[in-house]
Image (cartoon, helix red, strand yellow):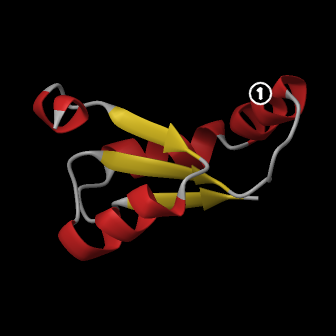
Amino acid sequence: EFAKTNDFCIVTQDVDFAERSRLYGSPPKVVWLRCGNAPTKQVGSLLRSGVEIIQELLNNPSLHCLELY
């Protein structure tokens, strides 16, 4: 509810948020990290490499969830 109220995007490895997004849409938008229990450096690299598609998610009202591998 906090993310929804404040127009935040949730970045998570938890499938529950992705499923919620599929059922109810957004807000909040969800970036679902599918990298397993990875080191912080690897997660940061994944997010940096996906910056353009993440921006597309945030700017496109018809998109609700993004999976990053």
Which quadrant of the rendered structure holds the C terminus? bottom right
Secondary structure type for disc 1: helix
Is 68 rendered above or below residue 39? below
Residue drawn at x 42%, y 50% as measured from the top left: 30
Q: Is residue 20 left or right of residue 66?
A: left
Q: Between residues 39 and 66, which one lies in front from this camera angle? A: 39
Residue furthest bottom as drawn: 23
Is 11 rendered above or below residue 26? above
Residue drawn at x 23%, y 64% as measured from the top left: 25
Residue drawn at x 82%, y 45% as measured from the top left: 37
Q: Residues within 10 Å of mark 1 (few under 14, many from 20)?
A: few
Q: Position of residue 23 (x, y in %)?
A: 25, 75
Quadrant of residue 60 within the rendered picture: bottom left
* Pointer 1 residue: 44
Is 69 rendered above or below residue 2? below
Residue furthest left as drawn: 5
Quadrant of residue 68 within the rendered picture: bottom right
Q: Is residue 50 left or right of residue 49?
A: left
Is 54 rendered above or below residue 61? above
Residue drawn at x 52%, y 58% as measured from the top left: 66
Q: Amino acid at mark 1?
A: Gly
Report the number of discs: 1
Q: Between residues 24 and 45, which one lies in front from this camera angle? A: 24
Q: Position of residue 5 (x, y in %)?
A: 11, 31
Q: Position of residue 45 (x, y in %)?
A: 83, 32
Quadrant of residue 42 within the rendered picture: top right
Q: Is residue 20 left or right of residue 13?
A: left
